[in-house]
Image (spheres, grey):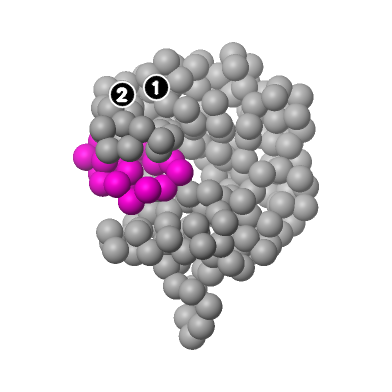
Amino acid sequence: MFILVNLKAYPCDPVEVATAAREVSEESGVRIAVSPQAADIARVAETGVETWAQHVDPNDYGSHTGSTLSEAVAEAGAEGTLVNHSEKRLKLADIDGSVRAAERAGLETCVCANNPAQIGAAAALGPDAVAVEPPELIGGDVSVSSADPDIVEDAVAAAGHVDEDVEVFCGAGISSGDDVDAAGDLGATGILLASGVAKADDPRAALEDLVEPL
Ligand SMILES: O=C[C@H](O)COP(=O)(O)O
């Protein structure tokens, strides 16, 4: 199981979370990555934790002021990127362009989507992974794996129908090892989570709880 911790724009210490994530990953053997703000990618990557961008734009080098260039985040130390997060929605052509841009820079890709139908469309674009996240559960106290298990199973089926090589992650409201375990039972191979770690009083303890059953 892969655990991808999205720090969003929460006012946490990204280096503290990244250091804890690297240590918990090493101790548990569970793959854990941290996705900070673009401006924090380099210092998060310097901790040794696997680092992901939260977004990249479709553009190449050139006159694109304000863009997030895939090559720049890769150069800063990112190994992967989210695309089309629920809080950073893109048009279909731009999702495709961002996945292609990320591939060009050697970044692993995870395209987020709201529901199984969108997961099928996202999988058709050939990312490494897709992540299903019901928007109404994001940031809440109830995990997708307990509140809406069907959406996870249906997303796994939808992606598999299009391309069996695309991994399927799930996210929203996940904060405990039991939630992670339940998601795995539903067929997810990765977890995308944020508030359960980024807003925790003790991020290290939160991470230890997440990997405990794995
Ligand atoms: O990127 C993470 C997801 O939006 C889930 O956020 P959450 O764990 O705070 O529900």
* Residue 117 is covered by the magenta coloring: yes
Quadrant of the image for the C terminus? top right
| Crowdedness near tag 1: few (<14), some (14–19) or many (≥20) residues, C-alpha within 10 Å | some
Residue 205 seen: no
Horizontal placement of 117 versus 68: left or right?
A: left
Horizontal placement of 61 versus 114: left or right?
A: right
Whether tag 2 and tag 1 are in contact, CB under 8 A, the answer is yes
Q: Residue at x 26, y 46 (%)?
A: 121
Comparing 208 with 55, the one in front is 55
Instruction: Pick whichever of labels 2 and 1 is earlier in the sequence.
Output: 2
Q: Residue at x 37, y 27 (%)?
A: 144
Residue 81: give x, y in percent of width and height: 52, 52
Vertical arrangement, residue 106 with respect to residue 148, above or below: below
Q: Quadrant of residue 141?
A: top left
Q: Dot 2: what SS?
A: helix
**What amino acid does circle 2 point to?**
Glu
Q: Which residues are magenta?
A: 116-139
Q: Name the outermost residue toward the bottom.
A: 63
Numbered mark located on residue 153 in the image: 2
* Residue 138 is covered by the magenta coloring: yes
Numbered mark located on residue 187 in the image: 1
- Label 2 CB sits under 8 Å from any ligand 1 atom: no
Residue 184: give x, y in percent of width and height: 45, 20
Quadrant of the image for the N terminus? top right
Total numbered labels: 2
Vertical arrangement, residue 111 with respect to residue 68, above or below: above
Horizontal placement of 20 versus 123: left or right?
A: right
Residue 50: give x, y in percent of width and height: 66, 44
Comparing 17 with 213, the one in front is 213
Q: Dot 1: what SS?
A: loop
Residue 157 seen: yes
